[in-house]
Each structure stands twice: as structure tokens, then as C-alpha cells.
Image (cartoon, rainbow, N blue to C red):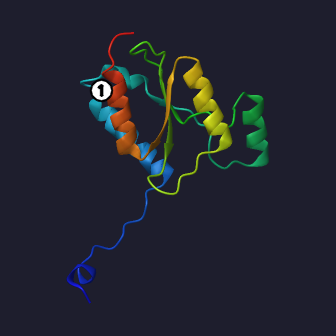
Amino acid sequence: MPYTQRFAAPSLPVPTESAEQRALFEWAALQTGNYPVLRMLYHIPNGGSRGKAEAGRFKAEGVKPGVPDICLPVARGGFHGLYVELKRRQHGQISDEQKAWITALSNQGYVAVVCRGWNEAANVIMLYLRLGGK
């Protein structure tokens, strides 16, 4: 058996989307000293599995399928704000509804992106904040 196979680290499980999102919000909380506007970063609770009654109530209250997970309602670089659809680093699928929302939001002057993992999302947020101004 080759040396690299004998001593290779076992593959780690891919974090869930929920774990990735929690990590992103922990990172954002740590960054608010340098970037106070990160206090405005929030999650849009559209996803998840719900019972029929709760799903019906949410739909009646205006929940729409495909809306991105995260919003930073801060103008930068001529854009109105940033939307992030956060996916797992591996295996996360983008639905047709999500693609449609990302396109529609982009057409309305928002930056709307899909990020794979919290690190990618954090990098996108930092790039967005560095656009500066309104």
C-alpha cells in the first residue's frame, strides 16, 4: 500500500447548510467591530421542512419559494443591497425558483449570488462591503 494511502486523513463529513449558516453568522458577529453594518445581516426563514398547517400559514403570510437565505440591506457600489443563497460546500442543489429570484434581484439592482460554504459567503460579503459608498 502506498505511503499516502496508509496515512491519509479520513474524509470529514460535509457540514449541513444550517451549520454553514451558523458559522457565517458567528463570523459576522466577530466582524461587527470593524464593520458595524454587519449587524444588519439577517436570515430569511424560507427553507426547512414544515408541517402542512405551518407551511400553509407561512404561504398566506407571504413566504415565497426560492428567496435567498441571507440579506444585507446595505447599499454599496451603486447596488441596493446583497442577497446570498448559501449552499453546502458539496451536494447543495440550486432550485429553479432560486435561480429565478437571483436573476430578478440582480435585475432590480441588488447583488444576488450563490455561495458554497460560509467561507465563500464571508469573502463575498467582504468584497461587497469594500465597494464603498452608496
- Label 1 belongs to which residue? 32
For mark 1, give the secondary structure: loop
Tell me, yes or no, if residue 66 can be seen here: no
Q: Position of residue 11 (x, y in %)?
A: 36, 70
Q: Position of residue 34 (x, y in %)?
A: 24, 24
Q: Is residue 126 left or right of residue 67?
A: left
- Against 26, is 4 above or below? below
Q: Position of residue 36 (x, y in %)?
A: 31, 21
- Against 35, is 15 above or below? below
Name the residue rendered at 78%, 39% in the picture: 56
Closer to the camera in the image, 118 or 97: 97
Name the residue rendered at 61%, 33% in the picture: 67
- Against 2, is 52 above or below? above
Tell me, yes or no, if residue 103 can be seen here: yes
Q: Quadrant of residue 3?
A: bottom left
Closer to the camera in the image, 88 or 53: 88
Q: Is residue 57 left or right of residue 123?
A: right
Q: Quadrant of residue 78?
A: top left
Q: Is residue 94 left or right of residue 116?
A: right
Name the residue rendered at 43%, 48% in the picture: 20
Most extreme residue toward the left, as rendered? 3
Q: Position of residue 85 (x, y in %)?
A: 52, 38
Most extreme residue toward the top, as rendered? 134
Q: Quadrant of the N terminus?
A: bottom left
Name the residue rendered at 74%, 41% in the picture: 55
- Against 68, is 48 above or below? below
Q: Is residue 20 left or right of residue 47?
A: left
Closer to the camera in the image, 109 or 20: 109
Amino acid, disc 1:
Thr
Closer to the camera in the image, 56 or 64: 64
